[in-house]
Amino acid sequence: MSEPQTVLELRDLSVGYYRDLNILSDLNIKARAGQITSILGANGVGKSTALKAAFGFLPPSKGDVLLMGESILSLPPHEKILKGLAYIPQQPGVFKDMTVEENLQLGGWTFRRDRLQIRDKIEANYERFPALRDKRRQITGELSGGQQRMVEIGRTLMAEPKMMLVDEPTAGLSKMLAQEVYEILRSLATNDGITILLVDQEIRQALRIADYVYVLELGRNKFDGPVSEFQDLEKAFWVA
């Protein structure tokens, strides 16, 4: 059986927040088509930094970022979105004073003049997240944390991304709401064929939904492999 196509690749990536002080050094990560790839490691090893560098928020001092084999290193974030790359940060980025539907409409900004397309994509989101249909006119800030995550994911899906960078998607959520978010992510990969690169501190949940895992240590690759090789990961070493 042939290996799935690599959608996103971080190649020999070194990056930091200050000159000559790298958080990541010679990092190599591949996210394969239709899979969830999880990046694990202790606090401060550079997991979130890797996503920020991939999306263009942090310029690397060395290395490259490839989307479908093409370097996107020089592209600003908004052009990466047009290429099919999306980023969902750890802190919810919804517009809390706007309604659910207004938030979703913003996800279709690049084709905002095509009202039929926007309507169709919003409807697709309501099919995907039935709980949002009944709350479409509700102010988003009044929703639960889990529902706000749904709105944010739905808004991201309006642009039909091929690849999603997802940072700590359940931070601050209850266990029940967190489980719902994980199920959404797994469904997006399995049913919609969206490739996901996931950073998470919830090791058990990340392993439950992941296909492939990378473990970082001190900003470098420690080891990686299919999730089946990581069933005893928590017993092998401690990750905060």
Image (spheres, grey):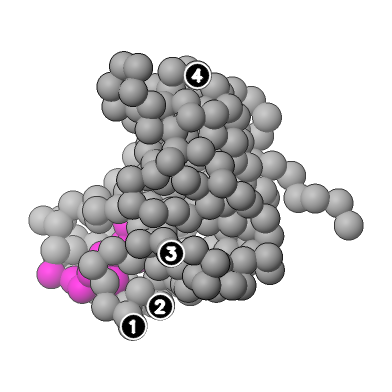
Q: Which residue is mark 1?
A: 176
Of residues 105 and 117, the one nearer the viewer is 105
Q: Nearer the viewer, mark 3 or mark 4?
A: 3
Q: Is residue 36 above or below residue 65?
A: below
Which residue is pictured at 40% across the width and 67% down the height? 202
Which residues are drawn in magenta?
Answer: 142-152
Looking at numbered disc 1 in the image, what kind of residue is underneath it? Met
Indicate whether residue 145 is drawn in magenta: yes
> What is the spatial separation of the Cα atoms under label 1 and label 4, in whole angstroms?
41 Å
Q: Which residue is mark 4?
A: 62
Of residues 167 and 152, the one nearer the viewer is 167
> What is the spatial separation of the Cα atoms under label 3 and label 4, in whole angstroms?
30 Å
Which residue is pictured at 35% across the width and 17% down the height? 20
Of residues 143 and 105, the one nearer the viewer is 143
Q: Is residue 104 above or below residue 86?
A: below
Q: Which residue is mark 3?
A: 238
Indicate whether residue 133 is drawn in magenta: no
Asked whether the beta carbons under mark 1 and mark 2 sit within 8 Å of each other, the answer is yes
> What is the spatial separation of the Cα atoms under label 2 and label 4, in whole angstroms?
37 Å
